[in-house]
């Protein structure tokens, strides 16, 4: 049986590029649509079309020409602080452009779809670890955009207009262990990248936003997942959807959390650099604790993480940073 043809939106970005590499390695034909607005990829796995999703006519032409079996949708703005400052930009891009993509898919009669969602949909969960059945109550516009798209997909699936799997990412970090790929954000906001860049001397100090949270050391706790384990989850989810056509929502996390202070301590240990840390007030839109209940993805997809270690995540990311 021939392998599926897979189209990735945002396939030149951080997560998309790692998924594209794994897809290529597994023998899939990969097509990428990316406007390259937030990434500067060293290597692209797949055939690249430099197109913005707002150009629905161009997207439709690509879909009709390439006829992918499934579309993996990564293209989105992802900064929580920026979403609070520029909410319209986030609704326009994350929701508006996704609707344009879905419109093009309907016209091209392509109905298999993998969506990059986020743990931000949960806001401040009542129970931790949080399961997929938890109430969705985001506390920032970024999370709201993910909830909106999930609702659209759910209703389309009920009407048999689409088959989809929504993967709710927790905190994605790390880099390709082979050193080919890694984060290329122009303005990184994620803790591990900021900490490593501070260790490198690119920033004079690292800010810790809030030390008065109801956690053991007063700082936020997050579930960090290695980008290659997340990439593997996409392959499994894609294969499951193509074989069953069953729409699902799945958490992607390890089921354990680390505080900001623990991450900073591990970065200092891995790099051997004791960089300056400045404690400041809380940042709007940050829940105290966000950890995944990952029992569903493990049971349904038989997903078994290979890089489930904060130290491994940071070592791979540091190796990548030193090459930049």
Image: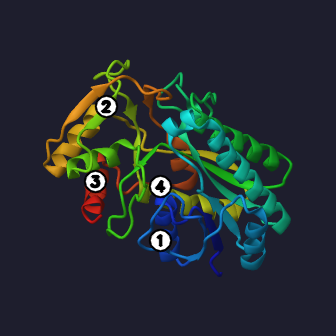
Query: Is residue 246 something one can see in this rendering?
Result: no
Q: CB of mark 2 within 8 Å of CB of mark 3? A: no
Q: CA distance from mark 4 to mark 1?
A: 12 Å
For residue 1, side relative to residue 85 (left or right): right
Quarter that holds the C terminus: bottom left
Q: CB of mark 4 within 8 Å of CB of mark 1? A: no
Q: Position of residue 228 (x, y in %)?
A: 42, 60
Q: CA distance from mark 3 to mark 1?
A: 20 Å
On residue 279, which mark appears? none
Q: Position of residue 214 (x, y in %)?
A: 38, 18
Badge count? 4
From the image, tell me which residue sits under label 4. Answer: 230
Residue 26 higher or lower than 115, as above or below: below
Q: Position of residue 315 (x, y in %)?
A: 25, 55
From the image, tell me which residue sits under label 2. Answer: 208
Q: Secondary structure at mark 3?
A: helix
Snapshot quadrant of residue 36: bottom right
Q: Decide: few, some or many residues near mark 4? Use Cα within 10 Å; few <14, some 14-19, many ≥20.
A: many
């Amino acid at each position: 049986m021939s392998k599926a043809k897979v189209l990735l939106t945002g396939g030149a970005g951080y997560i998309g590029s790692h998924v594209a590499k794994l897809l290529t390695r597994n023998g899939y034909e990969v097509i990428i649509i990316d406007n390259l607005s937030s990434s500067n990829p060293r290597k692209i796995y797949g055939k690249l079309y430099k197109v913005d999703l707002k150009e629905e006519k161009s997207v439709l032409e690509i879909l009709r020409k390439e006829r992918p079996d499934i579309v993996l949708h990564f293209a989105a703005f992802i900064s929580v602080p920026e979403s609070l400052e520029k909410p319209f930009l986030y609704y326009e891009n994350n929701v508006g452009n996704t609707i344009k993509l879905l419109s093009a898919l309907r016209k091209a009669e392509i109905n298999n779809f993998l969506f990059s969602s986020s743990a931000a949909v949960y806001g401040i969960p009542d129970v931790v670890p949080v399961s997929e059945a938890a109430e969705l109550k985001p506390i920032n516009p970024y999370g709201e955009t993910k909830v909106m798209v999930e609702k659209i997909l759910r209703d389309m699936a009920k009407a048999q207009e689409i088959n989809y799997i929504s993967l709710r990412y927790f905190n994605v970090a790390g880099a390709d262990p082979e050193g080919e790929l890694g984060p290329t954000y122009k303005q990184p906001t994620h803790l591990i990248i900021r900490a490593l860049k501070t260790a490198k001397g690119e920033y004079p100090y690292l800010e810790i936003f809030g030390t008065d949270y109801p956690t053991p050391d007063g700082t936020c706790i997050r579930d960090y997942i290695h980008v290659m384990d997340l990439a593997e989850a996409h392959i499994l989810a894609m294969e499951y959807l193509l074989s069953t056509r069953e729409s699902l929502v799945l958490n992607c996390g390890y089921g354990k959390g680390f505080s900001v202070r623990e991450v900073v301590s591990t970065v200092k240990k891995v790099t051997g650099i004791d960089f300056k840390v400045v404690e400041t007030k809380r940042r709007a839109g940050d829940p105290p604790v966000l950890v995944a209940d990952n029992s569903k993805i493990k049971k349904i997809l038989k997903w078994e993480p290979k890089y489930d270690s904060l130290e491994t995540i940071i070592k791979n990311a540091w190796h990548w940073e030193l090459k930049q």
